[in-house]
Image (tube, grey):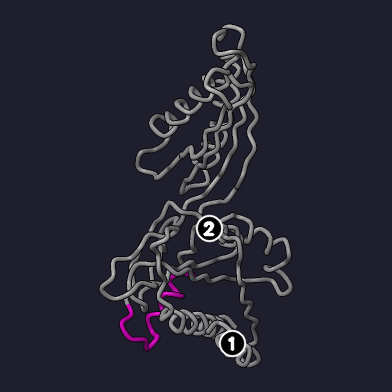
Amino acid sequence: MLLTAARMLKEREASLNGTVKLMFQTGEETFEGGKDMIAAGILENPKVDASLSYHVGPGGNPGGYFYNDESAMMASCDGFRITIHGKGAHGAYPHYSTDPINIAVHIHEALQELIARECDPAESTILTIGHFEAGTAFNIIPETAVLEGSIRTVSQKTREMMVRRMKEISFKTAEVFRGSADVVMLSEVPPLICDPVFTKKILRYMSDMPYPNMFAAPNIKTGGSDDYAEITSRVPSAYIFLAAGFPDEEPGKSHTPTVRFNEDVLPFGSAALANCAFEWLKENN
């Protein structure tokens, strides 16, 4: 379907005095695809003026689309690994140790206070520790402990504050308990914020399509992340979820074994992509 759309656009490029690039992004949720494609020159030669992305979602029947033209649609994602260095000892002699597990516990607790006491309650901010690893035996205090987690925000200002404070808390808490800490960033993705003017144009093009059972859901927000945000932070962009559910079927949650995607969304998505690109080029020759 997308190849059909590509051929259609290629045939019309000459009459439109413009160029359309199709970006088949990989690794969007490992936060590598967007950066790699930018590094490879996707936004240059010719220079890209605007971008449109569609992403399927398991809820709703094909013909539906979900968007946000007012604020961040998806959160940033700053993944981190904190390695705490202490001094190992036998469990019977803790006074000979610098216990990295104890330090890690205090770091974990202090990081939660960032949400409670340093973030605006009206603004969505998430800090999750998903991996805590230390030790190999019940009676040995290890030399190191590892915490891995992520920070998700919907504003660049809060994102910068949270990353800075996460590092400060890690370093200073470890120092208080006679240890040390290293922080490595595992991902650094900005919030995905669509351009309001460009998105409204895309919505107008889509609403004019003669497609059955179309419906629109505005101002959708999600704590998930996508490094297509690397594109939206550089050029005016619209990012839209296309409904890919089944009639009378409760949708499974994404990233679970129960999720299913209805391939009937493919004609709608391809038609929308071709139509929006054609109409935008026609208006912006």
| Tag of residue 226 | 2
Q: Nearer the viewer, residue 263 or 239?
A: 263
- Quick one: SS at disc 2? loop
What is the x, y in percent for residue 205?
43, 81
Question: Is 104 inside the magenta-drawn segment?
Answer: no
Q: Amino acid at mark 1?
A: Leu
Q: Give the crowd class for mark 1: few <14, some 14-19, many >=20 residues within 10 Å.
A: many
Q: Nearer the viewer, mark 1 or mark 2?
A: 2
Q: Give the crowd class for mark 2: few <14, some 14-19, many >=20 residues within 10 Å.
A: many
Name which quarter of the figure residue 147 lies in. top right
What is the x, y in percent for residue 242?
42, 72
Left of 243 or right of it: where is 270?
Answer: right
**Tag 1 residue:** 9
Query: Which numbered disc, 1 or 2, marks the residue that appears first in the sequence?
Result: 1
What residue sits 63% from the left and 88% below the top? 10
Q: Is residue 175 above or below residue 278?
A: above
Residue interval drawn in magenta = 197-214
Name which quarter of the figure residue 215 lies in. bottom left
What residue sits 59% from the left and 55% below the top? 31
Q: Quadrant of the C terminus?
A: bottom right
